[in-house]
Image: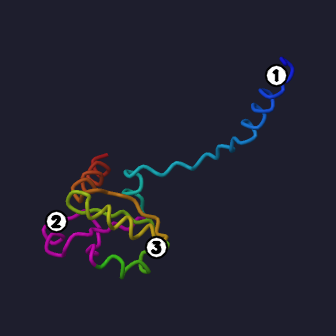
Amino acid sequence: MKGKLFGIILAAILMLSACKTAHVAEAPKSSIKDVINSSDVTLVDVRVPEQYAEGTAKNAVNIPLAEIQNNTESLKGKKVVVFCNKGIQADQAMEILKKNGIDVYDGTSWKNVKAIQDQKSEK
């Protein structure tokens, strides 16, 4: 009886250990500060033109959220940071761009992106 029980336990352990999948380490995504300050980034302000005109991050282009789907081709192959006033529209833009295979990062707000840019210029 003990031998049979030992055999069942041993078989169960072998089956469970065989089911483990190998852990594949993912390359860490760059920090948002590094991405914003890289020379090959495209900064996209997804607010409406009136808000964009009142202030934005340095070198940012304005593609309003309502037009982002129609501009995915122009962003393909680029590293893109999207932002708005508080991050809500940026999150929506990120979803759209990710679905279209674009390397996109969340800058949250234009003030956040601008502050990161200002930090770099102070150094």
Q: Residues within 10 Å of mark 1 (few under 14, many from 20)?
A: few
Furthest residue toward front: 1
Q: CA distance from mark 2 to mark 3?
A: 28 Å
Q: Nearer the viewer, residue 19 or 35?
A: 19
Q: Is residue 99 magenta?
A: no
- Quadrant where the N terminus sits is top right
Helix, strand or loop status at disc 1: helix
Which numbered disc, 2 or 3, marks the residue closer to the eye? 3
Extreme residue toward the top, this view: 2
Q: Earlier in the sequence, mark 1 or mark 3?
A: 1
Residue 28 position, x and y percent, is: 52, 48
Identified at 77% across, 26% down, the residue is 9
Q: Which residue is labeled 2 in the image?
A: 55
Query: Under tag 3, what secondary structure?
Result: loop
Which region shows up in magenta?
41-66
Marks counted in the figure total: 3
Tell me where residue 42 sits by quadrant: bottom left
Mark nearer the N terminus (2 vs 3): 2
